[in-house]
Image: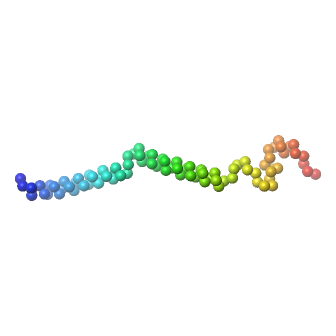
Amino acid sequence: MKPSDFRPHEAEFLRLSRDILKEEWDRVKGGEPTFKIAKYASAAMSLAFLLLICAALLLPPANETKPGNAKESAPAAERAETPAKP
């Protein structure tokens, strides 16, 4: 056998190995399933935490009274004790 007899087989081997290596590289580049789950879960939790911070900063507290409505927002026991104005 001469080296020239191997050339056609060598080209076919390189083509097939290139396809296999490409598939494996794409799998490795994407990450293992556990890593993918952790990556997306941490992104979702970060987004949820950011939304909670924005909501806490932008929305008024639930027990805050509006100016001029202090009597209306007072508890019922306090309103009953306050005499009505004539």
x and y, in percent, of residue 1 in the image: 6, 53
Q: Residue at x 81, y 43 (%)?
A: 76
Q: Position of residue 11 (x, y in %)?
A: 17, 57
Residue shown at 37%/51% (left/top)? Answer: 30
Instruction: Name the side, left or right, on which 44 lies relative to 53.
Output: left
Looking at the image, residue 17 sits to the left or right of residue 77; the answer is left
Query: Which residue appears farthest toward the top when viewing the image?
Result: 77
Q: How far across and down, in percent of the image, does residue 68 sit?
A: 81, 55
What sort of colour scheme is used for the picture? Answer: rainbow
Q: Position of residue 57 (x, y in %)?
A: 64, 53
Residue shown at 80% from the left, 53% from the top? 69
State the residue in front, 50 or 37: 50
Figure label count: 0
Q: Residue furthest right?
A: 86
Task: Look at 69% across and 50% down and name the residue there.
Answer: 61
In the rendered structure, the answer to whether residue 13 lies left or right of residue 55 reads left
